Structure formats: structure tokens, C-alpha cells
Amino acid sequence: MSAYKYKAVAVALLAVTASALSVSSHAQSVEQFYKTRPLTVIVGYSPGGGYDTHVRGVMRYFGRHIPGNPNIVVQNMTGAGSLVATNHLYNLAPKDGSFIGMVRAPVLEPLTGTSASNFDATKFNWIGSGMTEFTVCALLGAPTVKTFADATKTPITLAGSGPGSDDDMISKMLIKLLGLKAKVVSGYPGGNEMQLAVERGEVDGRCGWSFTSIKLIKPEWITEKKLKFLASLSMERWPELPDTPSIMEIAQTDEQKSILKVAILSADLGRPFMAPPGVPADRVEALRAAFIKTIQDPEYVAEVTKRKETPTLVDGKRAEAIIKELFSTPPALLKQAKAIVNEK
């Protein structure tokens, strides 16, 4: 047999073997599958930040509620506000239920629509979210700036983690739509690095900053009133910050409010978990059911309450509905939003 024919036969045999293994894997029950495989969870942010801490907290309980009780492996994959991790999960990760992720990029994609978005957010298998996100525009630096109105007159610097991130997107919207006089210093790997940048005085603050993350990592900044909250990124004033105006109070026109509403709607998904497209339906349903049980697990609730987090369940079906609503936004409105977010 010639070397060429031998190689062709070898390749064919490998293909048949891989196909057989795939069929065998898909034929397994959920319990059989997870008994023999770990579940890898990709986090699109750096270790030690609010997102990473939240994911690791959820994963301490998640495995016990999945049939087969798989070992959980958390893997951080930073870059471009979780865009790198999202593209990996969608295009490269196994589509058998052994990989899921916690990323924000697919939730924000209707607003960003960057050329680096190599995925269709509506095709992910949404597992659910255990926390809706409440974000703020807040400063530690810039001592003369006390209010949002002050920040439209006095220049400030804001941290960002790259195109497609909440911080960059929200900051650009506030600059363009509401006249915030700010420079965005982008490219930080995640929330932990941005928090350190604020603490060191490299930047004055952040817009699109998770209030939960602040409470978790730097609660004294709130209790000691070190942070100045310029606005809450919400439809109405947040009960924990009654003296801070919502961004809808600051917006003046219907167009401004409509564009900002899309950004606020994306926050309803908070910190969502999803599996790649193509995962067998029974494994998706098992992961969704396990997620609901995790967020309602008394031990988990006690742990997050102790950390001053508030568990808020958004199940997989509701997560899918939010994504569909985001993608049903009138094209003309999304075009305006994308132009703002992607402006250099």
C-alpha cells in the first residue's frame, strides 16, 4: 500500500472512530455522561473579580444537583469584555454538555455588533442567571465632581475592559448621549484590575460598574461614603441608593431613553450561564433544572446572603425570552446604539 493510500485509510478510520465515540457519547443517559466527565465552566473575566467570585460560589453547589454529580472545573478566559471566551464557547468548546460559560458578550451583542462577534447569541443554550445586574456610574477620584452634572463640565477618566464590555459600552453612551466629559481608559482584563486601577488613582471611576461587585469586594467604599454615585443604570432609582438619580431621570429625549433602555434590559440577564449550540436537549434540560435547584439551595442562599448578595433566579426559558426581546429591538434604534458604542 502506498504511503498516500495508507494515510487516507488512517484518516478515514480516525473519522469513523470519532463518529462512533460521538454517537456513543450522545446515546448515554445524562447521569452516565456526567459520571465520567468533568464539567468545565469558562468565565470570561479575570480571577478575583466580582464575576469570578460569583461563578465559583455557584459552582460549589451546582455539581450536587446534576445527575452523575460531575466534578466542576472553573477556567478563566479573559479578553475584550468576555468576547474571547464567548467566541471560544460558541466555536471551539465541545458541544456535548461538558462545557458551559458565564459571559456577558452575547447579551450585549445587539448593542455592540463588533466584527469580532463570531457567534449568534440566539443559538446558545441558555442555562439561567442567579443574579440580575444593577450597575452604576461611580467615582472614587475627581474630588471636585460630585454629581452627573458636574461630570458634564469637568473631565474625568473611566476604566473599561475592551470593546463589547458593559463599562466601555455604557461609558460611550453617556458621553455621546448625555454629554459626560469622560475619557475611557480601556483594556483592563476584568473587574479586579479595574477596581485596582480606581484604587491606585489610574482612573477616577467606572460607568457600568456592578453595585453587587462593589458590595462584595469593597463594601467600605459604600459604608464610608468614599464613592460618589453619579447615576444608577436603571429605569428607576435603586432602593439601596435612594439619593442617586436613575439614568432615565438624566436623559432628556425619547431617543436617549429608548437607546438607554436597551442597555438596561441587557442587565436583566445579570450574570448568565449558557452552553454552546448543539448540546443534546436532555443535557440542557438537566443543566437548567440543576441551576434552578442550586439558586434555591438553602446552603447557597445562606452563603450569598452572608456576602450581601441577593440571589435572583432567571431560569433558562426566561433568559431565552430576554435575548429574543433584545434582538427584536427596531433595527433603526440598534443602528444608532451600535454607532455610538463602536465609535472610535
Image (cartoon, helix red, strand yellow):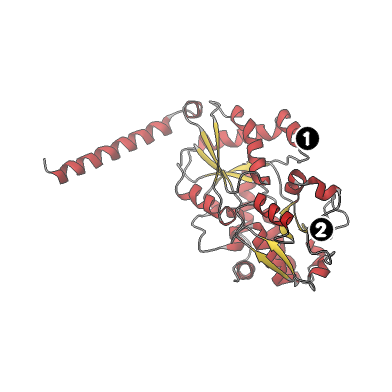
Q: Where in the figure is residue 87, as x and y percent of width and height?
A: 50, 52
The residue type indicated by label 2 comes to Phe
333 in relation to 51, above or below: below
| Callout 2 crowding tier (Cα within 10 Å): few <14, some 14–19, many ≥20 | many
Q: As rendered, which of 266 and 170 lies closer to the eye?
A: 170
Residue 313 in view of the camera: yes
Residue 255 in view of the camera: no
**Image point (61%, 28%), residue name:** 65
The residue type indicated by label 1 comes to Lys
Q: Where in the figure is residue 131, as x and y percent of width and height?
A: 70, 44
Q: As rendered, which of 282 and 116 lies closer to the eye?
A: 116
From the image, tell me which residue sits under label 2: 229
The quarter of the picture where residue 152 lies is bottom right
263 in relation to 11, above or below: below
Q: Residue furthest left?
A: 1
Q: Where in the figure is residue 141, as x and y percent of width and height?
A: 78, 61
70 in relation to 110, above or below: above
**Image point (50%, 55%), residue name:** 119
- The count of marks equals 2
The quarter of the picture where residue 304 lies is top right
Q: As rendered, which of 207 and 294 lies closer to the eye?
A: 207
Secondary structure under the numbered disc 1 in the rendered image = helix
Quadrant in which the N terminus is drawn = top left
Q: Where in the figure is residue 188, as x and y percent of width and height?
A: 62, 56
In whole angstroms, how far apart are the C-alphas of marks 2 and 1? 24 Å
From the image, tell me which residue sits under label 1: 306
**Image point (65%, 64%), residue name:** 185
Q: Is residue 158 left or right of residue 140?
A: left
Query: Which of disc 1 and disc 2 is earlier in sequence?
Result: 2
| Callout 1 crowding tier (Cα within 10 Å): few <14, some 14–19, many ≥20 | few
